[in-house]
Amino acid sequence: MKFIKTKILDIVIIEPVVHGDERGYFVETFRQDLLDEFLGFKVKFCQDNESKSCKGVLRGLHFQLPPFAQSKLVRVIKGAVLDVAVDIRVGSPTFGKHVTVKLSEQNKKQLFIPRGFAHGFVVLEDDTIFSYKVDNFYSKECDRGLAFDDDKTNIDWLLDKNELKLSDKDQNQPTLKQTPALFEYGVDYYV
């Protein structure tokens, strides 16, 4: 596996080694030891989630507050998405900035998003299957979100706004400016 730092150092792209021939392919999609070694700390995933969506579905931007903050390891099994992580750590030099990565069944890339980031994705192909690991269980009380079209984050979702399909919840999320202090930069949320 190849681990690639992004412009926001805490967000990591993971490129697995694909072994393929005329019969198909084999790939290791997760190695706890290699991830821990690269990150320099241990992430204990406890739940796997999967969604299937049609083109234009936008899910996010989501996060959970402590004590149920979550790290995510995301990938696409079928189809393609534009995956987005936004830094919501107050005091961070990259606060409000984001990283975008195209994840697809062809490139088999994965994205590690640590605690302290909002996450979302837009589906670029019909019948896309998106899979992800989280290191904390879902908590309705701690579930939060940010507006996908916030001027502060200025995310290019690659599709026209009229092509996007959002849940009622995601259409009515607050902007970064309307959201009270979320996470603090430099605080260890893994303790």
Image (spheres, rainbow, N blue to C red):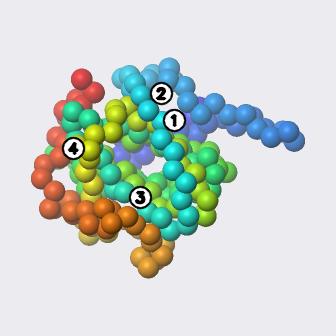
**Residue 79 higher or lower than 67, as above or below:** below
Q: Secondary structure at mark 4?
A: loop
Residue at 70% of width from left, 37% of height from top?
18
Q: Secondary structure at mark 2?
A: helix
Labels 2 and 1: the sequence-earlier one? 1
Q: Pointer 3: what residue?
A: 59
**Dot 1 amino acid type:** Phe
**Dot 3 amino acid type:** Arg
CA distance for labels 4 and 3: 19 Å
Circles 2, 3 touching at the beta carbon (< 8 Å): no
**Residue 45 higher or lower than 124, as above or below:** above
Q: Position of residue 112 (x, y in %)?
A: 44, 39
Label ID, residue 3: 1
Label ID, residue 141: 4
Q: Pointer 2: what residue?
A: 35
CA distance for labels 2 and 3: 26 Å
CA distance for labels 2 and 4: 30 Å
**Dot 4 amino acid type:** Glu
